[in-house]
Amino acid sequence: MGRSYIVEDDVEEYLCKLCSTQSGTVTGLFIGQCSIQRDFIVMAARTPQKEESADDGQLVDKEWLSEHARQVSRMLPGGLSVLGVFIISDSDAKDSLTTLRQLVFAVENLISSEQLWSPADDDVTDRVTLHVNPKTRKTVCRTFDVTDPKTVAKPADWKYQSRVCSNWATVLCWLDVDLLVPIPEKITSTKTVEKCLMEGLKSWTHQIESGVFLIDGKKLPEDSELKGGQKKSTRQTYTAQLLVSPDMQKSSDVVQRCGGSLSVRGVIHSRAFLHSNKPKAKLAERLLKMDVVSTVATRVQMLLEETLTSEESSRDVKQTEQLCLPRRVFCPVKVTGPLCVCDYQFSDEGLTEITDRLKEMLDTDAAEDDLDTTQEMSAELIQSEATEEATAETVEASEPRRDIYIGVAVGIAVALLATAASALYFSDA
Amino acid sequence: MVLVESNSVTIVRVRGPLELRCLLDSTDDLVLMAISRAFQSLRSQVKSQSCVFAVCGSPVIIWPNTGVYEEITPDTPCEDVFQWIQTDEQEPGGRRSAKKKSKRAISVNVLNLSLMMEVTRPGPLSAPVLSKTVQKSNFLSATLPIDCVVRTSCNNTIREACEQLLEALTQQLFEMEKVTLQHMKGTTLLVPEPVHFLLPEPKGLVTVVFPAGVPDRELETQRRELHQQFDLPDDRPYFRRANAFHFPDEPYKDGYLRNPHAVLTHPNLDNGKVYLVQGIYSYHHYMQDRADDNGWGCAYRSLQTICSWYQQQGYVERSVPSHKEIQQALVDVGDKQASFVGSRQWIGSIEVQAVLNHLLGITSKIMFVSQGLELASKGRELANHFLTEGTPVMIGGGVLAHTILGVAWSETTGQIRYLILDPHYTGAEDLQTITDKGWCGWKGPDFWDQTAYYNLCLPQRPRFI
């Protein structure tokens, strides 16, 4: 007996629509939540079309699809993840298996390379693949164990159901991030900066992972169920708290030479969804902590991918560069039900860019009004006391820009290339 | 559940690491300022609503600055908090008592809290900013081992204890800042380390911050100041690290029993007074350390008990010598032939005196008693020894050696009892057996062989701090 997949009715509708409107091979991703017993699929999203792809879509671009999966997984709050891939093609289901197998592995490898948290023993490692014949609408569902390189396709049960999206509990929190890491004396490239930031994030992740998790101020035994919470109509929402304590470090050199420091400071909103009437405290804790870590890591990575300048100043003059991390914006998966996906909005972006991206990545038609922008406020640049006078003229510089240089002696305003965010966001992978 | 006896003292202790991180500017003045600023920010952290005390092993969580108490009320007496602590051997909330402690044990209970920081906030707030500062300088990253204690009496509430702890926390951070800045050489920095000491009443438990890794011998100036500050005599150590207070909930790792006599009831003599060993010793006896010395090692063990006293009072840093080391010392001073090392030969009071002098640099007085019955008239001298020196006394006579830990003596009637620690015990480190069966106990003058001669080695206390 293989795994069973409980799939939202809308997904069937979506696949049918693709079958009838698209010609040639279509691929895409499944999004949902897995649990020990069964997995829930709440969404499917087709792989965006590559502009330059001249061939009539017969070939499946593995890298393109996994890059899509990477982008999509950044847009999923805690509890939702990319669970597998689908392919709609005329070819025989058996012939597609090799392709599907390669795809799930490629997706898994890329996504897990960005994850900072350590895997748990009871993590589900099966990923689903679905082959759909556009003419006969016949579907073949198989799973692969992505931790086993010798895995063979196992049959699985694929079942459509209505209201799969409605019965979820939400756990949320706002969390203060306060990270300070040194930059090495010799900065060789932007990679150096990225590396130390990631190192800092790793030990911060460890702190979060070992933090004490509270629901309504109470520490719950691991196996207990979440109780109480605020019921908004049928929704269950729980506010979580997290207590941390730094790791005891035993290092003899408490002072090290450095070329400066990097800090990340501000508050993030984190959210996780649990499919169940009686969500377990342990799972809520893990999913929310994973979301806390990934929403911070994702934003830092996005910022690094786009902007951090590599030019190094040889002067001894203190130079501070501040960059706003994008804020998190949510968009409901369905009109009813608590499930949301999210996106990150840079300060120079409008909401249209978000709705465009939701269309491109998740193939969902969201209006600007659907977006929930109230959970986080845009970051504000903090001016340190030492730099106040010197910077007056630099702050008002050219418009769409994500960074500001503040120098003690010289204020240099460097207007970065105001690149079209959407293009960069996806196409330069 | 941990059983707590009524009318006991509760020590409330909060521990937890705090991270001190900052970029140090290049010039000296700015470096000091940067460190002070980092400490200031830690102080405001412990005063903020994020500061949390979590009672170890329990669901009890306290936000001391906002007055939020989970599971308990702020007016809960400190000792009632123990009932929330779950021990391993029982069901949470169960009523079965943990292993019953000896009734006579001194009951000091320690309520352990861990210092944590809440990182969640009521939102929504501003998204994060990344800032990059480019400047050739130094980066300071240290973990401060915060450790604060307060002693409460039975009816103190947990709120009172928490308020005192908050004050102690701020105070400790000030102390740490002071010590850090004092011991800074260039960009070398020593992590400040809090140590607790139990001073004679009414001062009680005090906490001092020392720079980690600096040996006691280099900290005499600091100790002198402390002796002055706390009005302590200048003739004995109070603030060496060996004097650090030992929390009753932390077992000694070496396995030896400490001060087994502490659970005994004093004998009732007409107009009698009790004169006891001062400070802490460990009980050394036959068959310990995987050494079978049954029948010959009693004086060695008594000597070890004496050595353990000097070590734990902070007079010497060397560990308690083994039989072999004791024998080697006697060869080294020319008292014995080389073949003595590894043998099973007895030693007596004179040898104990020689070894103390050679290995520990301690001088001892020898008291001769030609007949055991004379010991009954040595009350004044022994009482005086325990008053002024307070060290354990080794007594050897005939084939037996014992340790005298004190006397109860009546000046008017001359009646006397001896507090004896018997090194001939071969059993396990079980306080109940040792005290019930008299391996550590009060003995009358008939304990001594009335006709045998005895030599007493009375080790002297050096005068330094």
Image (spheres, helix red, strand yellow):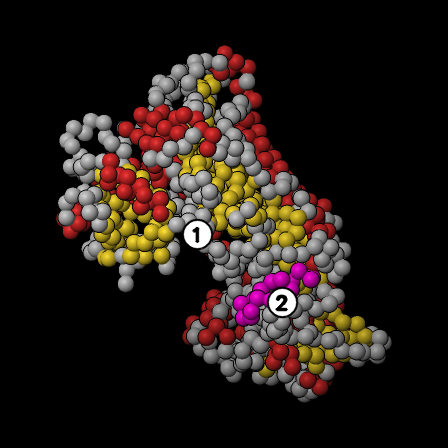
* Left or right: residue B188 compared with residue B162: left
| Residue B213 visible, this orientation | no
Q: Are marks 2 and 1 in contact (CB under 8 Å)?
A: no
Identify which residue, A164 or A118, lies in the foreground.
A164
Which residue does the numbered mark 1 point to in the structure image? A275
Q: Quadrant of residue B136?
A: top left
**Amino acid on which disc 1 is placed:** His
Q: Which residues are magenta?
A: B79-93
Q: What kind of element bears circle 1?
A: strand
Q: How many marks?
A: 2
Residue A373 at x, y = what percent? 49, 32
Identify which residue, A49 or A210, lies in the foreground.
A49
Quadrant of the rendering where the C terminus of chain A is positioned: top left
Q: What kind of element bears circle 2?
A: loop
Residue B368 at x, y = what percent? 67, 76
* Left or right: residue A133 compared with residue A402: left
Q: Residue at x 63, y 40 (%)?
A: B48
Residue B458 at x, y = what percent? 65, 69
Q: For mark 1, name the chain.
A: A
**Amino acid on which disc 2 is placed:** Val
Kindly report the distance in space between the C-alpha atoms of the residues bearing marks 2 and 1: 39 Å
Mark 1: few, some, or many residues within 10 Å (few <14, many ≥20)?
Answer: many
